Image: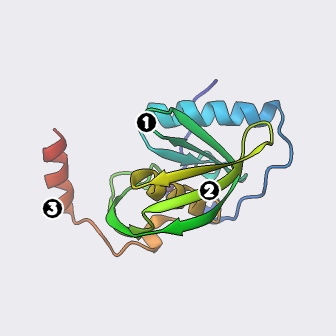
Amino acid sequence: MALRNIVTVGDSVLTKVSRPVTKFDRRLHELLDDMAQTLTEAGGVGLAAPQVGVLRRVVVVDTGEDGILELVNPEIIQESGEQTGLEGCLSVPGKYGIVTRPNFVTVRAQDRNGAWFEAEGEALIARCFCHELAHLDGQLYTEIAERMLTAEELRAMEEEEA
Ligand code: NI
């Protein structure tokens, strides 16, 4: 396993559409392992392959108690409810925005060996599914944010965390 560099906004790789995974081989497993390690190290909730410079439809999500969920070729097949809240991105460091997302999301995806499964997400995890899958289509949350937090709001948030 190895840490990978997280690409930040301004790099054109973040605006491109990722290709489906067709080979469930050692290379994919290495990518998934590296992405999980990179996500954990960065302290994020989710990471999409284009964020480490790989244009493949691969996402990892830290679901908390259940550990890292690997999603290969994921698609949202059901969504309901609505939540409006704070969102950030490892590729847009130091910024946060207010984004409205569905509150419940069901994703269909393949695991690292190609087997299809479904995963349900609520609240933060639903937000994360939507955010990460958008990365696979070259979209950043900053494009759909109702507004970005001001410098003053960011400072207040940092003070709260400290
Ligand atoms: Ni992101």
Q: Residue furthest top?
A: 1
Sequence-wise, the earlier of marks 1 and 3 is 1
Task: Give residue 147's quadrant in the image.
Answer: bottom left
* Secondary element type, mark 3: helix
Residue 16, x across and y down, in percent: 67, 64
Residue 118, x across and y down, in percent: 65, 50
Judging by the rendered image, the residue that carries numbered circle 2 is 107
Disc 1 marks which amino acid? Answer: Gly
Q: Residue at x 68, y 55 (%)?
A: 108
Residue 136, x across and y down, in percent: 64, 59
Callout 2: 10 Å neighbours few (<14), some, many (20+)?
many
Judging by the rendered image, the residue that carries numbered circle 3 is 152
Q: Which mark is residue 64?
A: 1
Sequence-wise, the earlier of marks 2 and 3 is 2
Q: Report the coloring of the rendering.
A: rainbow
- Whole-angstrom CA distance, mark 2 to mark 3, is 36 Å
The quadrant of the picture occupied by the N terminus is top right
- Whole-angstrom CA distance, mark 2 to mark 1, is 17 Å
Sequence-wise, the earlier of marks 2 and 1 is 1
Q: Nearer the viewer, residue 65 or 74?
A: 65
Q: Which mark is residue 53?
A: none
Q: Is 153 on the left or on the right of 144, as rendered?
A: left
Q: Residue at x 19, y 42 (%)?
A: 161
Answer above or below: position of 149 versus 119.
Answer: below
Disc 3 marks which amino acid? Answer: Glu
* Secondary element type, mark 2: strand
Answer above or below: position of 72 versus 41.
Answer: below
